[in-house]
Image (cartoon, rainbow, N blue to C red):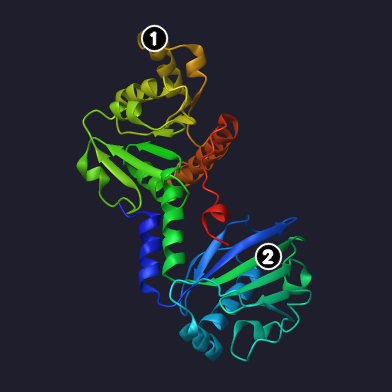
Amino acid sequence: MNSKVQSLKAFLGSAGRLALVEVAGTKGSTPREKGAFMLVSQAAIFGTIGGGQLEYMAIDKARQMLFSPLEGEMAAKRPEGVLSGGTAKRSRTAAATPPGDFAATLPSRRRGTRIDVGEVCATLDVPLGPEIGQCCGGRVEVLIRLVDAALAQELVAAAEAEETHLPHVYIFGGGHVGQALASTIALLPVHGVVIETRAEALEGMPENVETRLTPMPEAEIRKAAAGAAFAILTHDHALDFLIVAEALKRDDAAYVGMIGSKTKKATFRNWFLKSAEGTEAEFARLVSPIGGDGVKDKRPPVIAALAAAEIMTALVVHNATSNIDHPVQRDKEIAG
């Protein structure tokens, strides 16, 4: 399993000189929240602060800081591991970007923008209006810092802490829909786990999704973390019923969903109430079919997209109502 932390470590280790671009403050409507960040190298980026002209401006300024002759001279004078030398910042109105850089194509886009520049950091205070081609209407303060060994370690530590608090999404079944749902879940801020009884069904899963091979998948429900989501879509209806019955016993689950038709749901209800000692209250928590029935399209990628949206909504609602503080606030974890 290749986690997002491993991807971050790989980027930090291979990208060469880097700048950290972080949303330090927001007012009004903005593309991303405070703490969102990206890393910028000469040829690549890792993460995003929301895209659009704001992001291009930040990338442009980060690369100017990384590769200007002045920065080279300053870097040679700074002790290793020092993020700021206490040098007074100078405030200036943004100048035109040199020809060949992205900003040169947008000569009027920085109206109202303020840039403060120090030896190893810069602050962009950007209004998100028509002057830069964004109509969010808010204002974003972006902090750009050169990444040294100490800051790189802080980034990794914050990412590791955040990853340990990611909500878990358990996908039971690695068939066509299971594969599609795993691929969709792999793009989201969750810890995805695919559970199967067949080894061949786990082949080709996304590398950042955990896989588990077991003869008793229903037992995995009991070991699951609180606040987890369970999507049940195996190749066997009887096995689906066993797993769903076990999941509905978890009153701390954020989501329990089963693939199938209205007939399958009705059959399960009859069995669940009569043979599995289930209750109507427990049955009412079952989502089936997963993804809803508003879109009449049974292609696996479509079902997966609808189910993933449904699962993420359930996770957010559960987190908001459970008073569990899952996220790690990056603005507190990364030293200013």
Residue 15 on image: x %, y %: 40, 74
Tell me the mark number nearer the camera, choosing from 2 and 1. Answer: 2
Q: Are marks 2 and 1 in contact (CB under 8 Å)?
A: no
Above or below 227: residue 147: below
Q: CA distance from mark 2 to mark 1?
A: 56 Å
Mark 2 residue type? Glu
Q: In the structure shown, which secondary structural element does the residue marked by tag 1 occupy?
A: loop
Residue 65 in sight here: yes
Q: Looking at the image, is 171 positioned above or below residue 39? A: above
Q: Residue at x 40, y 56 (%)?
A: 4
- What residue would you read off at disc 2? 141
The local secondary structure at tag 2 comes to strand
Residue 92 left/right relative to 270: right
Q: Is residue 176 left or right of residue 86?
A: left
Q: Nearer the viewer, residue 259 or 140?
A: 140
Residue 211 numbered mark, or none: none
Specify the quadrant that holds the C terminus.
Answer: bottom right
* Most foreground residue, 122 or 90: 90
Image coordinates for residue 115, horizontal then vertical, percent: 69, 76
Q: Quadrant of residue 30?
A: bottom right
Viewer-closest of 205 and 9: 9
Residue in front for this viewpoint, 110 or 288: 110
Amino acid under disc 1:
Glu
Q: Which mark is residue 277?
A: 1
Residue at position x 32%, y 33% in the image: 234
Task: Tell me if residue 293 can be seen.
Answer: no
